[in-house]
Image (cartoon, rainbow, N blue to C red):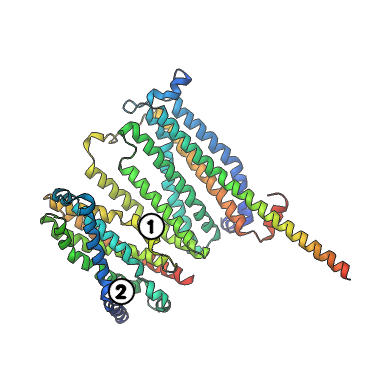
Amino acid sequence: MYFDSFQAAMAMGGHGVYVWSAYGITALVIAQLVLWPSARKKRLVAELRGEQRRRAGASQETGQSDRESS
Amino acid sequence: MGAFLSVLFRRQLALGLRRPAQLLNPLLFFALVVTLFPLGLGPSTDTLSAFAPGILWIVALLANMLGVDSLFRSDFDDGSLDQLLLAEQPLYLLVFPYLLVHWLLSGVILAVVSPLFALMLSLPGEGMLVLTVTLLLGSGVMSVLGAVGAALTVGLRRGGMLIALLVAPFYVPVLIFGSAAVRAAVSGLDALPYVALLGAMLSFALALGPLAVSAGLRISADT
Amino acid sequence: MWSFFHKLGSPPWLYRISGSILRWLLPLAVLGLVVGVLWGLLYTAPDFRQGNSYRIMYIHVPAAVVALAGYYVMAIAGAINLIWRMKIADVAMLAAAPVGAALTFVALVTGAIWGKPTWGTWWVWDARITSMLILLFLYLGVIALYEAYDNKTAASRACAVLALVGTVNIPIIYKSVDWWYSLHQPASIKFTGGSTIDPSMLYPLLLCIVSFYALFTCALLANMRVAILDRERRTGWVQRLVEEGG
């Protein structure tokens, strides 16, 4: 370990603000890059499942009405 | 083949010359934007002559970028572009008359008139000839690259701003070497290497550009 | 060999295989990045001229390298799409664009932050930063062109042409910007010439670069999986997948 203490590592000889903010922004963007597709996938799967359920519901109803009318 | 190309060339030229107003618009635009710079930067001759190479080149670039949108537009709208795509001649060659006419009617005219605007920005006399020559070559490169953007966006209703977004990065090398050539001439250095580089870029653009233009036209015609 | 290409054209196979790749590659990439970054941040000596601010290099350089490589990935995928009309190449090209643009953005922002302690200003028209900015515009141009088309098949082919033109142009742009900078550069801030990097700084940097490549691959695959699901939403295998719970 190059730095003596946690405080020294945070300060980085006066450059800490720059270094840590650069790393923070990078971490945010990378997290976005990884999380965004999985969020989109969840939304898509939910949407498709909703469609399936609606279709299943619709076919059941038409099935019942068919039976009632016969 | 040659006959077909020359017919196409004469048709394009006639279409371009039929509306003189459209021909004059880029020149008017050039004059107007050149007028804006002293108003923004102040009338000091020293400042203006220092910035003149860059200003003139950037304005030429903008004029080209705004004008190139109409390159295939009317032919796309009236369906003659579809005829061209069906022609037995290779599209790669058929693109050349379009590029040549666009270059003649925008780049060449602008290059010939540019010393006048250079005078207004008090560009030193040594730079005049180099400015004209580099604009002649550079506008050729810009016409080819702009045509790629025009071909890709001709099927879209709102192409204008988008073309600028697409092709402006490609204009960067032309701008760098064009304005550097003028600056070199003004400060008494040899401008020939820059002119040679622009010539190389023009040859390169002419060799590969029409490939991209014809690919773009085919995509746009499909939509 | 041929069966591999044949399988590449099969969306369900690609979806399954990319899922299993992601399952081990993503943790590995994150682990590599964390180790590389901590190594660079805490276990290397500061640069004798720039002090500790040089530690931004461990993310700035990898982001820039991978952002540029991403453009080539996009262009190659676009070329495959144009020549062989391979659907999967089309998906890969569109997945690469936002990831590459984001990494270019990271390179620009970290470069600006690095510039403040080094040059005293946030923005310097330095050759590499200027090239990165132009690269960002090239990425945004591809994305804007895609968004402008209603017909998405034509859109991806148009983007492929644009990306290929960009690929031919990038070396010319980079060289000319380099030259432009050396012409205008005041001698006082020139400190990059011929500087060699100490091995103790090089190893964490290399680890970070490899991890960034791996992360790019992960983001690319993850984007591709969503796009595949979206495109194949009406097919039986997607419907079964949804029934089983995604």
Q: Amino acid at mark 2?
A: Pro
Task: Tell whether B206 sits left or right of B35.
Answer: right
Q: Secondary structure at mark 1?
A: helix
Q: Which mark is residue A61?
A: none
Residue drawn 77% across and 62% down? A58
Disc 1 is attached to a residue of which chain?
Answer: B
Q: Which residue is mark 1?
A: B165
In the image, residue B147 lies at what x, y percent? Answer: 35, 66
What secondary structure is marked by label 2? helix
Q: Which residue is mark 2?
A: B97
Give the distance between the C-alpha atoms of the residues marked 2 and 1, in whole angstroms. 25 Å
| x 26%, y 72%: residue | B23
Image quadrant of residue C5? bottom right
Of the pair C124 and C34, the residue shown nearer to us: C124
Q: Is residue C19 left or right of residue B188?
A: right
**Residue C182 x, y percent position in the rendering:** 24, 43
Instruction: Place residue B174 in its image quadrant.
Output: bottom left
Compared to residue C120, the image places residue C91 above or below, namely: below
Q: Is residue C120 above or below residue C238?
A: above
